[in-house]
Amino acid sequence: MTRKLYWENPYQKEFQACIEKVRPSKTAGSKELLLDQTGFYPEGGGQPSDQGTLSGHRVTYVYLEDTSIWHVVTSSGEGLSAGDQVTGVLDWPRRFDHMQQHLGQHILSAVFDNSFDARTVGFHLGEQNVTIDLDKGPFTQNELDRVEEMANNIVFDNLEVLSSLVSDEGSQTNEIRLVNIPDHDICACSGTHPKATGEVGLIKILKSEAYKGGCRLTFLCGKRALAAYQHIHQQSQQAAASLSVGWPELSEAVKGLLQDNKQLAKENKDIHQQWSTLKRDHLLAEAQVFSGVPIVTMCDDAMEYKSLTFLANSFRQAPHCIALLGITNPSPRFVLLNNTNSPSVSMNEMLKESIHHIEGKGGGNAASAQGGGSRPEGLAPMLSEIRDAVIEKLK
């Protein structure tokens, strides 16, 4: 059984150990080491493993196998052999971050349990966020605010965090470690934690969402919470400056901006619809008529796709005409419309014969087809070929 120095003193940043076994790793350029003792926490209980170095070799992953703790190190050559003495150095910022997040989880879970009888059934400490899964919820914002305040009061009280080992009656080798925040929480946990709740620094709940009949809570603690606040504050200050308001007035300024944008979008839509009606009538007035059917052919190099869409919708309301509409910038796009109800004129069938001009894709039915391609220079020939085919069908 590997001696767990991280339980004895989670603040120990450097230690000495003897290599007991060496074996190949599944990771290329790495090997796995078994030590007689270690300060590296192995992955488990929702907490990622520690990282650091062993005599200068990078430790990328640590895991528990039965009662042995294996260290994956970036070394495929000589220098690490059974019997060698090595010096372990922890990536301390990573370790302390995990300690803050994990104890923050204990505190939050205790408050939800004591206040709402909501049990924690899952925990994940990720690189960016931390989550717990509760068997109840989701919770209202007022409830979350109340939990957040109670949890941070436990942090501010700077209570001592106690830990102890008890024997597992069902095993001769395993021990159970109890972590105790007096008057608030006691639970079995193998993770690493600070010696006092004050070292968590701050607990900030980010989100509560429905998950598997309960809820998933996303939160940050300590330096992660500070970094998140600094980022949010910086972004808010920049946004406020761009709107020429103070940071406290940002929310109202954004509401006003959204309202203005909504009104402008409505006005823009009205203008597009008016324009499309005028453009449609102009094209129909200039269209040639074959067998009593006006045929509009338009290949525009400047029109935007949004305008093409409005124009096509306008033509859908025009009775007894055929419209072959296309734009080339930045790439060829087209809409083919047949409002004649003629069974012999199928836009989709004619498109299949001519779309090779633009090396494109498209589809539809007899009354309507649309698509795009990659050869702008081929759009005009494609529309011209379809126009000729339509005329032949109308004859």
Image: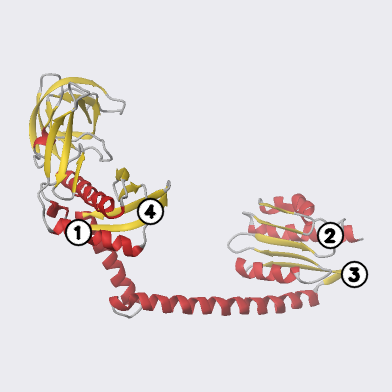
Q: At 22% across and 59% down in the image, what residue appears?
A: 150
Q: Which mark is residue 137?
A: 4
Residue pointed to by mark 1: 152
Query: Is disc 1 surrounded by few (<14), some (14 to 19) or many (20+) residues within 10 Å?
Result: many
Q: Nearer the viewer, residue 176 or 61?
A: 176
Observer-nearest of 78 and 39? 39
Q: Earlier in the sequence, mark 4 or mark 3?
A: 4
In the rendered image, which quarter contains the C terminus? bottom right
Task: Please state which amino acid type lies under the numbered disc 3.
Answer: Gly
Q: For the residue labelled by badge 2, is the local secondary structure a helix, a strand or a loop?
A: helix
Residue identifier under label 3: 292
Q: Which mark is residue 390?
A: 2
Tag 1's secondary structure? helix
How far apart are the alpha carbons under marks 1 and 4? 21 Å
Q: Is residue 210 visible?
A: yes
- Would residue 91 be seen by someone viewing this image from the given angle? no
Tell me the number on the disc at residue 275. none
Give the alpha-carbon distance from disc 4 to disc 3, as whole Å.
67 Å
Mark closer to the observer (1, 2): 1
Report whether 389 appears left or right of 169: right
Q: Quadrant of the N terminus?
A: top left
Of labels 2 and 4, the one closer to you:
4
Which numbered disc flags the more N-terminal residue, 2 or 4?
Answer: 4
Q: Residues within 10 Å of mark 4 (few under 14, many from 20)?
A: some
The Cα–Cα distance between marks 1 and 3, rounded to whole angstroms, is 80 Å
Label 1 and label 2: CA atoms lie apart by: 75 Å
> Residue 22 appears in which quarter of the rendering?
top left
Q: Position of residue 277 (x, y in %)?
A: 71, 77
Looking at marks 2 and 3 on the same chain, the residue that comes earlier in the sequence is marked by 3
